[in-house]
Image (tube, rainbow, N blue to C red):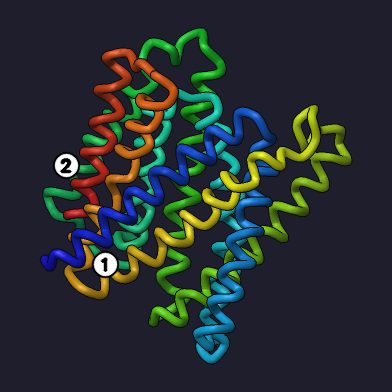
Amino acid sequence: MTAQTALFALATSLLWGLADFGGGLLARRTPALTVVVVSQSIAAVVLGAVVVVTGGWSAAGPQLWFAFAAGLVGPVALLSFYKALALGPMGVVSPLGSLAVAVPVTVGLFLGERPGLTQVAGIAVAVVGVVLAGGPQLRGAPVQRQAILLTLIAALGFGTVFVLIAEASSSVTGLFLALFVQRLTNVATGGTALLVSVRRGAAALPEGGFPWRSLPALAFVGLADVAANGTYSVAAQHGPVTVAAVLASLYPVVTALAARGFLSERLRGIQAAGAGLALVGTVLLATG
């Protein structure tokens, strides 16, 4: 493993972790669907500029259908995740969201791969973590049940996106184009859902109108997600993909630390243990 791999992979964890924290925090004041649409729109504009500068259109091909499919799944996952983060606590939600890595493992099994002992152990540890992370609050606490359910839906969606994006490109230039197509589809899908929800009487904005003061934060959430994809790509190109994936998968730790530092969240012992086990299970799955 090179120092460059470790540096960029850890940068990925930092960016994804802060993006999750920011998105969850914004969703507590602004409808989560609006947060998704606005942040992804900003990301799409920036990615469009990158594609033009790098000549990314030359990498266009049938594989972009995978990016389109990822764009359909992505808004559902992001919306579920931001709603779960808004319900909190973030220190439980974020590690559970990292279980998305189980999806690529499942796809590998379907395609004929057989898990090693480390992967089997990771699956077992992760399942125990999911159960414990709910803690006693799973009884008689609908909000907490909803947070856990939304997080698992988000993890399934994120994992599906990871698989689809991996098939959507084979180069850095192609990756930029695939991410651009994905973001455009994200915006179209999320925008349509937002329009439908408004017509049904839901609010698209807070009572005070569009949160212009939150625009920099919304931009950060969208751009941090894009930057994380870029740093992960660099990390994977300069060293073992497994090592890069393990280090990049530590982003829930960043979210949990941010929630503790900025929101002073305090977790119950059983919840902290469950969140920790889920994170350990994720690392075992990635290294298996």
Determine the residue positioned at 17% across, 68% down: 240
Q: Quadrant of the C terminus?
A: bottom left
Q: Is residue 171 above or below residue 226?
A: below
Determine the residue positioned at 33% across, 63% down: 232
Say few, some or many: other residues with alpha carbon within 10 Å of mark 2 (under 14 / 14 to 19 / 20 or more): some
Residue 116: name its quadrant: bottom left
Q: Is residue 56 above or below residue 119?
A: below
Pointer 2 residue:
121
Which residue is the extreme one toward the front? 213
| Residue 129 visible to the viewer | yes
Amino acid found under the numbered disc labelled 1: Ala
Q: Is residue 143 above or below residue 284?
A: above
Going by the image, does 25 lie left or right of 169? right
Q: Residue 142, position in %: x, y?
A: 56, 16
Mark 2 → mark 1, Cα distance in angstroms: 26 Å
| Residue 92 visible to the viewer | no
- Residue 8: which numbered mark, if any? none
Pointer 1 residue:
235
Return the disc, 2 or 1, that comes first in the chain's sequence: 2
Q: Which of 77 and 102 is in front in this view?
A: 77
Q: Which of 88 and 11 is in front in this view?
A: 11
Q: Quadrant of the N terminus?
A: bottom left
Determine the residue positioned at 22% across, 59% down: 7
Q: Residue 280, position in %: x, y?
A: 21, 38
Q: Are marks 2 and 1 in contact (CB under 8 Å)?
A: no
Residue 227: name its quadrant: bottom left
Say few, some or many: other residues with alpha carbon within 10 Å of mark 1 (under 14 / 14 to 19 / 20 or more): many
